[in-house]
Amino acid sequence: MIKLGLTGSIGMGKSTTAKMFAAQGVPCHDADAMVHRLYAGRAAALIEAEFPGTVVDGKVDRTLLSPHVIGKPEAMKRLEAIIHPLVHEEEKIFLQKARAEGRRIVVLDIPLLFETGGERRVHATVVVTADAAIQKERVLGRDGMSEDRFNAIVAKQMPDHEKRRRAHFLIDTGLGLEAAERSVAAVLRAVAGMV
């Protein structure tokens, strides 16, 4: 079973691209979505214990958590020490299920793939990219996003040009949906021969 690692900086269109892989019948494990589920489930009490006052009605409130961790590397490491092992457990369950179903290709959608050494867990990497101006426009259009917050997030991520250099495959979402869909199909054709 081929594991593709899908990544890209904030606002590059990674979630949309993951949906394109899913539409082609490829199971996708979305680490971000898993974090959201964990924040509303078994991670909530652990995070509340480490960062008191960040959980409301049994769910981590990201707006309350952000001031504790954004721009604070030591606090972010403490949060990651809680979340990352839980996400890895869920990923293992996903992979076991995909193997049991006889899947030939799966996608692991991992936001900080290269930053966390995640490329060692996959057979090939797919980087989603777009022009920096398109990226900034997309991100600043999100609810609750400020330029300062955007800059803090980008500063934590590996530069796009470095991700592109390390990628086995590139998908440029700045060229439109149809071009991205063609790129997804091309990636799947290329890796089908590896199975």
Image (spheres, rainbow, N blue to C red):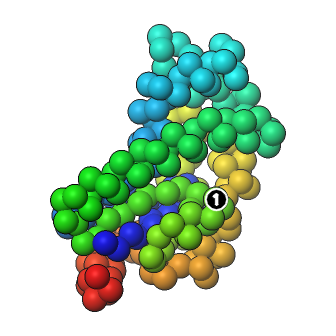
Residue appearing at x 67%, y 35% in the figure: 79
Displayed quadrant of residue 16:
bottom left
- Regarding residue 23, the answer to whether it shows in the image is no
Residue type, numbered disc 1: Thr
- Quarter of the image where the C terminus is located: bottom left
Residue appearing at x 56%, y 63% in the figure: 118
Q: Does 182 sit above or below residue 39?
A: below
Residue indicated by mark 1: 116
- Tell me: 109 left or right of 80: left
- Of 139 and 16, nearer the camera is 16
Residue appearing at x 39%, y 69% in the figure: 3
- Of 22 and 195, nearer the camera is 195
Place of residue 78 in the rendered image (x, y in percent of width and height, measured from the top left): 72, 36
Residue appearing at x 56%, y 33% in the figure: 144
Place of residue 180 in the rendered image (x, y in percent of width and height, measured from the top left): 33, 72
Q: Residues within 10 Å of mark 1 (few under 14, many from 20)?
A: few
Displayed quadrant of residue 177:
bottom left
Place of residue 66 in the rendered image (x, y in percent of width and height, measured from the top left): 66, 31
Question: Please, what secondary structure does the residue beneath circle 1 have?
Answer: loop
